[in-house]
Amino acid sequence: MKQLLSLLMAVLFASAAYCQAYYDALEKQEMATADTMKFHYPFQLQNIDLCHIPKSVLYTKCYYWLNTIVTSGANVKSHFQIQDKTGGKLMLVKIGYGDNIYFSVTIDVKEGKYRCTLDDVERLRKVKNGYGWEKVGPYQQEDRLVMYRITKYADGLFANLHDYVRKDNNNF
């Protein structure tokens, strides 16, 4: 029984070491890619899309997309900073991504088109007297990796919004 237990522990330790090595190699690869990309400060990603949909329908679709997709329905009201149907502007703040990283999403709607912007990327960091918020910038290698990962995440977010807006089965 002791031999079986020690063999099981050895296998678990080896697989944990392999997984850690795999994720370390993946992070090094992402870091190398992030170091070759040019990031601008303040960090902002935008997607402009033409869709030939009336403004009121487009606003409603974007509103529901923000409610259901980005925040997964959890306490959405506290995240909305702007809801201006006549001006065609929606803004969600403090959307969580990963550990202690937050960003804002703004959607500007006009007749037949919209612009989705992801910006105001912040991270909660340990500072001298506790924790504090700080903007993510292109100056530290760790922040460049965060910016790279959020860029990849934003590509999926923009594609998801693009598909959601074009769905005909939304009940609007």
Image (cartoon, rainbow, N blue to C red):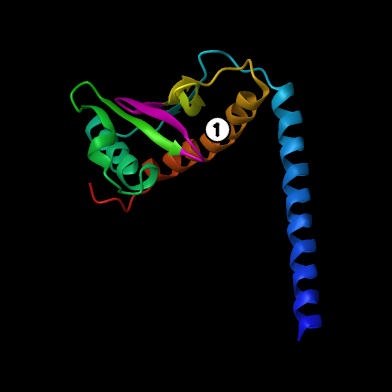
Q: Going by the picture, which residue comes out furthest to the left?
A: 86
Residues 93 and 66: in front is 93
- The majority secondary structure of the magenta stretch comes to strand
Name of the residue lying farthest toward the top: 41
Report if residue 119 is visible in the image.
no
Q: Is residue 109 magenta?
A: yes
Marks counted in the figure total 1
Q: Amino acid at mark 1?
A: Ile
Taking 171 as reference, is 24 above or below it?
above
105 sits to left or right of 17: left
Q: Which residues are magenta?
A: 97-116
Residue 73 picture location, percent across and down = 30, 48
For the point 24% across and 51% down, the residue is 171
* Residue 136 picture location, percent across and down: 53, 21
At horizontal 46% and vertical 25% (from top left) the residue drawn is 122
| Residue 147 horizontal side relative to residue 9, left or right | left
Based on the picture, tell me whether residue 34 belongs to the magenta stretch: no
Q: Observer-nearest residue: 5 or 29?
A: 5
Quadrant containing the N terminus in the rendered view: bottom right
SS of the residue at dot 1? helix
* Residue under numbered circle 1: 150
